[in-house]
Image (tube, rainbow, N blue to C red):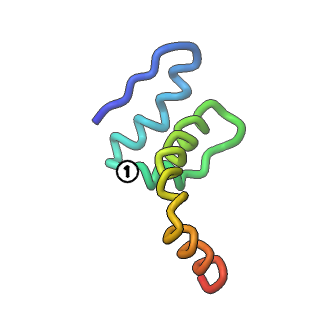
C-alpha cells in the first residue's frame, strides 16, 4: 500500500496518507478522521467517504442507519 501526490500543495495533502500508512489505518478510520476545516487535507477524508457511497445506497444499510439514529 502506498500513496503518491504530485502538484501544488502536495506536502499538505500527503500528511493524511502518511499517517494512515504509518499507523496501518483503514479507509473507515480515514473517513472518521476529524481534521481542521477548510484545508486541502480534507480531500483525503472526502475520498475515504466517497469510497463508502455505493454501500449507502443499499436499503438494508439505510434502514440500519435509521434504526441506530432512533435507538442508538
Question: Toward the viewer: 45 or 34?
Answer: 45
Name, please, the residue furthest toward the top: 7
Q: Residue at x 32, y 48 (%)?
A: 24
Q: Residue at x 46, y 15 (%)?
A: 6
Q: Position of residue 64 (x, y in %)?
A: 53, 75
Q: Position of residue 1 (x, y in %)?
A: 28, 36
User: Does residue 22 lie above or below 52 as drawn?
Assistant: above
User: Does residue 5 lie above or below 72 as drawn?
Assistant: above
Callout 1: few (<14), some (14-19), or many (20+) C-alpha neighbours within 10 Å? few
Quadrant for residue 42, please give it: top right
Q: Position of residue 32 (x, y in %)?
A: 53, 55
Of helix, strand and loop, which one carries label 1?
loop
Name, please, the residue furthest toward the right: 38
Q: Residue at x 71, y 37 (%)?
A: 38
Reading the image, the residue beneath label 1 is: 26
Q: Residue at x 62, y 30 (%)?
A: 40
User: Does residue 50 lie above or below 68 as drawn?
Assistant: above
Name, please, the residue furthest toward the front: 59
User: Does residue 13 lie above or below 30 as drawn?
Assistant: above
Q: Which corner quadrant holds the C terminus?
A: bottom right
Amino acid at each position: 500500500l502506498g500513496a503518491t501526490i504530485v502538484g501544488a500543495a502536495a506536502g499538505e495533502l500527503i500528511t493524511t496518507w502518511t499517517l494512515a500508512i504509518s499507523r496501518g489505518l483503514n479507509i473507515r478510520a480515514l473517513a472518521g478522521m476529524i481534521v481542521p476545516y477548510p484545508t486541502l487535507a480534507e480531500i483525503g477524508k472526502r475520498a475515504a467517504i466517497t469510497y463508502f457511497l455505493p454501500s449507502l445506497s443499499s436499503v438494508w444499510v439505510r434502514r440500519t442507519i435509521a434504526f441506530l439514529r432512533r435507538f442508538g
